[in-house]
Image (cartoon, rainbow, N blue to C red):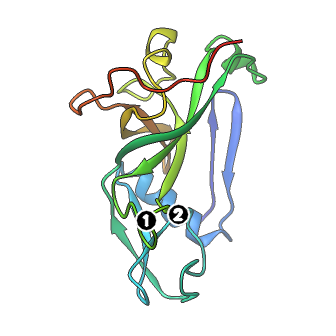
Amino acid sequence: MPGLKGDYLGMTLTVSELDIENTEYFRHCAAHDFHLQQCTGCGLLRYPPGAACHNCGSLESRWVPVEGKGTVHSYSEVHHGIQPAFKERTPYLILLVDLDTQKGKPGPEHALRVGGNLVTPNGVLAPPELVKRVGIGSRMKMVFADVTDGLSLPQWTLDEEAKQPARPWRYPKE
């Protein structure tokens, strides 16, 4: 399978054809389907994709569909965009989301955590008024931002159908 390459907001993204696990992961994302590897040894899902299970060390896995919903675990609010295309879109949020799937396994402190930008439902970086509404505890759902044929990025948008916290926790402003 050839490697993947595309331009996202002025940045060149490349996944080498030698990176078999990530090529397969992004193949699913390009179809707007979220799939993760499931270990055939212990049954746990893993993210990011990899050659071996981080829990039991098994080299065997299969790709399974996973619901892209969860809760913001942490975030970074960017006010100084380094890339020219990002400068005009500040502030923007980079989110780390605990997936609902497999939360608390193999132990209570564990979760599958998937990063991505906060975007609108159509995959565009979120405007400032949406940025202000999201914080730790916000309920999110995954959407995909198409980069090029065969390459889409999993991103996060506010799940308007889910019960949201009255005031999600946000870092205090200096």
In the picture of the structure, the residue carrying the numbered disc 2 is 47
Residue located 30% across and 54% down the image:
67
The answer, for residue 120, to whether it is visible in the render is yes
Query: Mark 2 and mark 1: span between their CA atoms?
Result: 7 Å
In the picture of the structure, the residue carrying the numbered disc 1 is 36
The answer, for residue 1, to whether it is visible in the render is no
Decide which of 148, 101 is in the foreground and name it. 101
The residue type indicated by label 2 comes to Tyr
Q: Secondary structure at mark 2?
A: loop
| Relative height, residue 153 to residue 10 (above, below) | below
Residue located 46% across and 9% down the image:
129
Asked if the residues shown at circle 2 and circle 1 are in contact, with their CB atoms under 8 angstroms apart, the answer is yes
| Relative height, residue 58 to residue 91 (above, below) | below
Q: Secondary structure at mark 1?
A: strand
Looking at the image, residue 72 sits to the left or right of residue 21; the answer is: left
Q: Quadrant of the N terminus?
A: bottom right
